[in-house]
């Protein structure tokens, strides 16, 4: 079998040399999904017939672009024309979108071969993929632990070698945290870098699509493919997209890296601290200079996030009312009853919790105290970063305070669950680009290093992550599943 | 105790854009249900709004035409509520930073000039439309209207009678039409009006408790609804009771207001800035350009017509009711000796013709230049005013130049003195009774003689000349 995790460029080269065909890659992807996904449960839908069809067409020719013939999958909150898109929610079961997301169009236009839709926490609300309305996904490194979330299906599918890459979405850490838990690379681009057209909104001012890949170079290749202004998304930015791949020089000598002192007090456990310290030393050894920086409003980030995101969500999710599409409850007596029953039965607990929090935060008489206040905090957090970035080029932290936890461990305590995003949330509030790159193992489970860049400076983030990856080789470690044996 | 009526209006005006406000679907009335829809205006998962600049331009133009200050920085907010015609379950609107504020409209009530304040003008999207099945068992939603651009205009509570409310609306409609902002057809819903009304004793500053009336779907119904509600409230107050704050619906068939909901059922719309749409930031130059798009407005035009053309205020009012009509008159009046003649023809013959023919002025084949020519031919005596009427009718139907018609039908007025004198002599000889009457002081008797000459010449004789010739002939005899 082909090793789908060897890197997109390597797969592309093999295709070009005609050692492999797009059909080989598609068949390999499908075979791995068939064999392993009953355990991992990363996929909500496998589009195997379409993928075979597509591969057949693509096999007839030598590939032009890097993504031609490469099997990938999408988090199920990105629309795919004609293919069910559920956002991991019962309320959208059976929903077939009439159009494809901007990212779907772009990847398909560049020859990528979509093999399926990936599991997620319902409407991207969660940190373990246990909030999926269908089933939880398991971590390929250990089937008893979570893959993280909300893009858990994306991280698990890439880690298990079922696809060469996947897209996730990141509102408070939903790309980076699962990438960290699954030992893969996850990049959240700057807000506005990638079109959100066709990304089903959770919190519009925070959501951003990004790649989950095996290597940093893959992340650069995929970002290149999906970045750029889209007139269908008014929040996407009219900026030239730099050549991310050629930015991967391997050289970070003289790079100024900041360590936020506030992050070290945020419940990071000892073993994570040790792994992180080692990473810091490795970066120093590569020629970067390490500086302490301060992000004084960090302590308020989680509270601000859990007002802003639910407030936007309460409005964004209001359209799931049973009128036009998706699930509609039966036996309703009247319109109000139909709304109530549809939404009560269609949404899961965490989604309902956040809708209630958000509705409350926006209610008249509370708006100033909650939503408006949270937006003010957000401004302060953004300023914290701006000031820190006057001193340094990059800010680093662990991606999450711990490695992946056991399935069921935190489901009864949402607040503890929320804390797993403590390092990633401030980045979304500030709109900055950040990557999670594997940085070691703790008791056999992967840990991730987060690198945060300046606005629209994904190039530096990728360059640093790439240099670190080359020096450490953590990304080449694969779980047993990906190697073809039992985990 | 006498009560003063206090009225404030909320008007929704659909903007005459080619496409909807946040997507590329057509903005067109009357298409089959759900044919002008797309994922964006249907609120499909994952779609995003993109502001149609034409809607923004028209919104700013409207604000400026209502003498509002235009904000250089404003934003869109979400108004959250559940209803099947509201596909996203929120309406994109403007809450605390409307595009325009602090404007006014001037109207003439009787002899008095009144200035009605405009609190705000804001941009928003329209909702779809519900159609209920005749059997009452189901409802159908038509999303063609969802996403049609609207402006909401809120007046100050400056209106003091139902009639004033109607006059204000008529003026507002004329302004919107003049500026090509909207066709303002109430029957098609492109202009809709809700009203707040309360009463207070004359001299009292504090407002009384108000009610809101919805569903008044014509100017006449606005006036009727407000008159009804005014007397309803007055009865309550005279009976010593208090008016309850309510939302009412005007019911045309029973000619009464009906309770829709009371104050306790008021919605909390949970407004917040729409994160999908960036701020609207306008330069001074951009706003200046919109100002240049505003033509002379009805009030100014009315005043100018009175002053420049010396026509009565009533005429000026009628002739400025629509932009097209006012331009038609303007083009004509400018080039004739006596603009009142042009005013009479347009107000009488032309408007009368259009009404019977069920046509608009811009569908009239007769050009102002031809009308000028016709008036000129009357003034220089080429044709009589009686002939002119017939020629005019032909011109309005065929669009032919008056000279062409006159030539084709041989209608040139006979102004040849010798020719007229010969006919007049014959008539005088044949009607000694009339001559006798005239001589004995019945001046009117001359008319019968003139009429005879006109009859013999099939109306082509110059009546003034005939009149003089007959008088001269009788006096000479």
Image (tube, coloured by chain):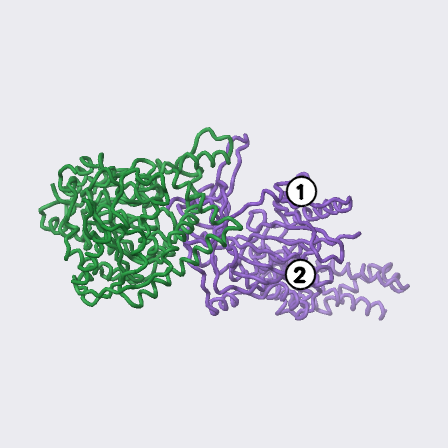
Chain colours: A green, B purple
Residue A435 visible within the image? yes
Q: Position of residue B388 (x, y in %)?
A: 66, 61
Residue B109 lies left or right of residue A347; in this view the side is: right
The spot of residue A479 in percent (x, y) is: 16, 43
Q: Give the Cα distance between marks 2 and 1.
A: 27 Å
The answer to which of A486 and B349 lies nearer the viewer is: A486
Which residue position holds label 2?
A: B107
Looking at the image, can residue A124 be seen? no
- Residue closest to the eye, A466 or A265: A265
Residue sitting at 20 percent across and 53 percent down?
A439
Q: Residue at x 69, y 55 (%)?
A: B164
Q: Earlier in the sequence, mark 2 or mark 1?
A: 2
**Left-right relation of A16 to B298:** left
Q: Which of A97 and B358 lies nearest the eye of the viewer?
A: A97
Chain identity of mark 2? B
Between disc 2 and disc 1, the foreground one is 1
* Residue at the spot of label 1: B257
Q: Residue furthest right?
A: B440
């Amino acid at each position: 079998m082909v090793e789908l995790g060897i890197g997109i460029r390597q797969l592309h080269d093999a295709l070009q040399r005609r050692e492999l065909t797009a059909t080989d890659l598609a068949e390999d992807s499908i075979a791995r999904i068939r064999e392993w996904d009953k355990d991992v449960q990363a996929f909500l839908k496998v589009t195997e017939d379409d993928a075979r069809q597509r591969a057949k067409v693509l096999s007839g020719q030598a590939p032009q672009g890097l993504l031609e013939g490469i099997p990938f999958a999408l988090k199920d909150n990105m629309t795919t024309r004609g293919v069910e898109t559920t956002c991991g929610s019962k309320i959208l079961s059976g929903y077939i979108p009439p159009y494809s997301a901007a990212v779907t169009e772009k990847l398909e236009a560049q020859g990528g071969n979509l093999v399926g839709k990936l599991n997620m926490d319902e409407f991207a609300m969660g940190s373990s993929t246990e909030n999926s309305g269908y089933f939880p996904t398991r971590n390929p490194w250990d089937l008893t632990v979570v893959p993280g979330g909300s893009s858990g299906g994306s991280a698990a599918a890439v880690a298990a070698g079922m696809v060469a890459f996947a897209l996730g979405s990141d509102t408070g850490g939903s790309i980076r945290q699962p990438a960290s838990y699954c030992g893969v690379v996850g990049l959240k681009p700057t807000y506005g870098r990638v079109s959100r057209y066709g990304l089903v909104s959770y919190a519009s001012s925070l959501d951003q699509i990004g790649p989950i890949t095996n290597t940093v170079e893959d992340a650069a290749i995929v970002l290149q493919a999906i970045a750029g202004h889209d007139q269908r998304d008014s929040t996407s930015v009219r900026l030239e997209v730099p050549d991310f791949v050629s930015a991967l020089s391997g050289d970070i000598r003289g790079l100024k890296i900041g360590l936020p002192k506030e992050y070290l007090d945020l419940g990071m456990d000892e073993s994570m601290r040790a792994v992180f310290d080692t990473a810091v030393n490795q970066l120093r050894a590569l020629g970067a200079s390490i500086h302490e920086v301060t992000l004084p409003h960090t302590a308020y980030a989680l509270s601000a996030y859990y007002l802003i995101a639910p407030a936007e969500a309460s409005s964004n999710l209001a359209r799931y009312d049973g009128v036009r599409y998706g699930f509609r409850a039966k036996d309703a007596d009247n319109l109000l009853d139909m709304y109530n029953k549809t939404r009560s039965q269609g949404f899961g607990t965490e989604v309902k919790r956040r809708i209630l929090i958000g509705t409350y935060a926006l209610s008249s008489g509370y708006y100033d105290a909650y939503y408006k206040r949270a937006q003010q905090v957000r401004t302060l957090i953004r300023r914290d970063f701006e000031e820190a970035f006057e001193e340094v080029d990059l800010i680093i932290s662990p991606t999450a305070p711990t490695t992946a936890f056991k399935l069921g461990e935190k489901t009864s305590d949402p607040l503890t669950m929320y804390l797993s995003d403590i390092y990633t949330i401030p980045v979304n509030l500030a709109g900055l680009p950040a990557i999670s790159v594997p940085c070691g193992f703790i008791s056999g489970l992967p840990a991730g290093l987060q690198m945060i860049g300046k606005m629209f400076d994904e190039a530096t983030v990728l360059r640093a992550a790439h240099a670190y990856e080359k020096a450490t080789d953590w990304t080449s470690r694969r779980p047993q599943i990906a190697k073809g044996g039992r985990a | 105790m006498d009560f003063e009526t206090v009225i404030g209006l909320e008007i929704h005006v659909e903007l005459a854009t080619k496409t909807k406000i946040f997507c590329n679907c057509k903005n067109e009335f009357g298409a089959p249900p759900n044919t002008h829809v797309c994922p964006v205006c249907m609120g499909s998962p994952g779609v995003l709004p993109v502001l149609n600049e034409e809607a923004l331009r028209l919104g700013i133009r409207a604000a400026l035409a209502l003498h509002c200050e235009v904000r250089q920085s404003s934003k869109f907010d979400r108004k959250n509520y559940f209803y099947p015609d509201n596909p996203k379950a929120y309406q994109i609107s403007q809450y605390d930073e409307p595009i325009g504020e602090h404007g006014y409209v001037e109207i003439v009530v009787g002899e008095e000039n009144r200035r009605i304040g405009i609190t705000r003008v804001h941009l928003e999207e329209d909702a779809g439309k519900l159609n209920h099945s005749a059997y009452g068992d189901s409802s159908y939603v038509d999303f063609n209207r969802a996403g049609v651009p609207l402006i909401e205009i809120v007046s100050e509570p400056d209106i003091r009678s139902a009639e004033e409310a109607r006059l204000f609306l008529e003026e507002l409609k004329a302004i919107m039409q003049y500026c090509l902002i909207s066709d303002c057809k109430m029957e098609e819903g492109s202009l809709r009006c809700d009203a707040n009304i309360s009463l207070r004793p004359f001299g009292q500053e504090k407002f009384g408790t108000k009610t809101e009336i919805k569903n008044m779907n014509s100017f006449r119904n606005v006036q009727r609804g407000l008159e009804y509600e005014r007397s309803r409230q007055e009865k309550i107050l005279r009976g010593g009771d208090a008016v309850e704050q309510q939302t009412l619906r005007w019911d045309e068939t029973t000619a009464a207001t009906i309770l829709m909901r009371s104050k306790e059922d008021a919605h909390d719309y949970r407004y917040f800035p729409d994160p999908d749409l960036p701020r609207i930031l306008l330069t001074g130059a951009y706003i200046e350009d919109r100002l240049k798009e505003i033509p002379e407005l009805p009030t100014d035009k009315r005043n100018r017509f009175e002053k420049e053309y010396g026509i009565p205020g009533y005429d000026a009012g009628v002739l400025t009711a629509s932009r097209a009509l006012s331009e038609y008159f303007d083009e004509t009046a400018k080039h004739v000796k006596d603009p009142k003649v042009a005013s009479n023809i347009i107000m009488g013959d032309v408007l009368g013709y259009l009404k019977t023919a069920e046509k608009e002025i811009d569908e009239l084949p007769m050009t102002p230049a031809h009308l000028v020519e016709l008036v000129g031919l009357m003034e220089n005596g080429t044709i009589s005013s009686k002939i002119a009427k017939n020629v005019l009718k032909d011109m309005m139907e065929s669009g032919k130049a008056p000279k062409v018609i006159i030539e084709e039908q041989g209608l040139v007025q006979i102004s040849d003195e010798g020719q007229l004198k010969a006919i007049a002599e014959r008539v005088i000889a044949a009607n000694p009774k009339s001559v006798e009457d005239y001589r004995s002081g019945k001046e009117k008797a001359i008319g019968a003689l003139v009429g005879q000459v006109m009859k013999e010449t099939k109306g082509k004789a110059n009546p003034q000349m005939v009149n003089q010739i007959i008088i001269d002939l009788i006096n000479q005899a």
